[in-house]
Image (tube, helix red, strand yellow):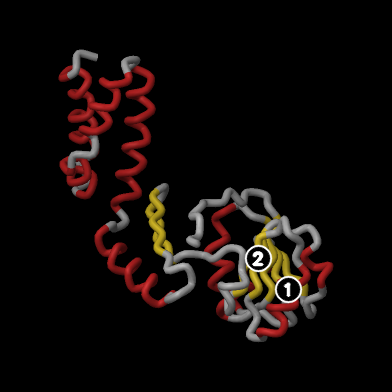
Amino acid sequence: MIDYPVQLNLHNKSVVIVGGGKIAERKLLKLLETGAKITVISPTITNTIKANVAQEIVKWKQKEFFSEDIDDAFLIIAATNSPKINLQVLESCNDQQLINLVDNPVQSNFIVPATITRGKLSISVSTSGASPGLAKKIICEIANQYDSSYESYIDFLAQCRTEVQQKVAEGEMRSKILKELLNHCYYDLTKKGLYEERQRKFQRLFKKYDC
């Protein structure tokens, strides 16, 4: 049996992190840009989590965990340093909730893969919990190949795709133009900051295909 990879839209969803240490902090930082409504349950929290609480980005319940803390949660992360408490969190969940135990991927119903993001580009690597270290090693190798310039490149491709869809009705012709945009020269122009030249080169594609 293998895991099924998905990407979740957590906008306005209730997310609860049980735990306030460094692991909980790392999980929180990954969740901040999702638009989720995040609550941290822990007697103590790190300074980084406190800073987010102070800015009212995150809610903090300064207390020990009780089962009712996750009644309305869509997604829960049990990130305490106590396997006993993490298991208690698991046992408090219902069948419709998503739960990750940071120390027990086998009993979790989802895991978080090692991921890099470059704007709209997201690349994830998972070993299904077998070796998180290997997943991180591979993702670091990938990160060196896809630097921050890919954020602008992806935005350019998205804008071009919209324009092609508006101007080109014929499906096969549309596919040919979009495939040409994947030519490495467009990325090279992006990396060099030659955006006007990149745009002119794109516009010439319409003439090339009589669009």
Q: Which residue lies furthest to the front in this view?
A: 1
Percent from the top left, x then y, of residue 40?
Answer: 70, 70
| Residue beneath disc 1 | 89
Q: In this view, does 169 lie above or below 101?
A: above
Asked if residue 54 shows in the view, the reply is no
Q: Callout 2 environment at 10 Å: few (<14), some (14 to 19), or many (20+)?
A: many
Q: Callout 1 environment at 10 Å: few (<14), some (14 to 19), or many (20+)?
A: many
User: Which of the pair 200/115 is nearer the observer?
Assistant: 115
Residue at the spot 54% in from the left edge and 56% down from the top edge: 33
Percent from the top left, x then y, of residue 41?
Answer: 73, 73
Quarter location, residue 64: bottom right
Task: Inspect the image, locate mark 2, and give the three-letter code of the amino acid beneath it.
Answer: Ile
User: Which of the pair 171/50 is nearer the observer?
Assistant: 171
User: What numbered label is drawn on residue 99?
Assistant: 2
User: Which of the pair 199/119 is nearer the observer?
Assistant: 119
Task: Inspect the image, locate mark 1, and give the three-letter code of the amino acid beneath it.
Answer: Val
Quarter location, residue 157: top left
Percent from the top left, x then y, of residue 18?
Answer: 69, 73
Asked if residue 19 shows in the view, the reply is yes
Quarter location, residue 199: top left
Residue at the spot 15% in from the left edge and 19% down from the top edge: 208
Under tag 1, what secondary structure?
Answer: helix
Do callouts 1 and 2 mark residues in contact (Cβ within 8 Å)?
A: yes
Percent from the top left, x then y, of residue 19?
Answer: 67, 77
Q: In this view, does 57 lie above or below 21?
A: above
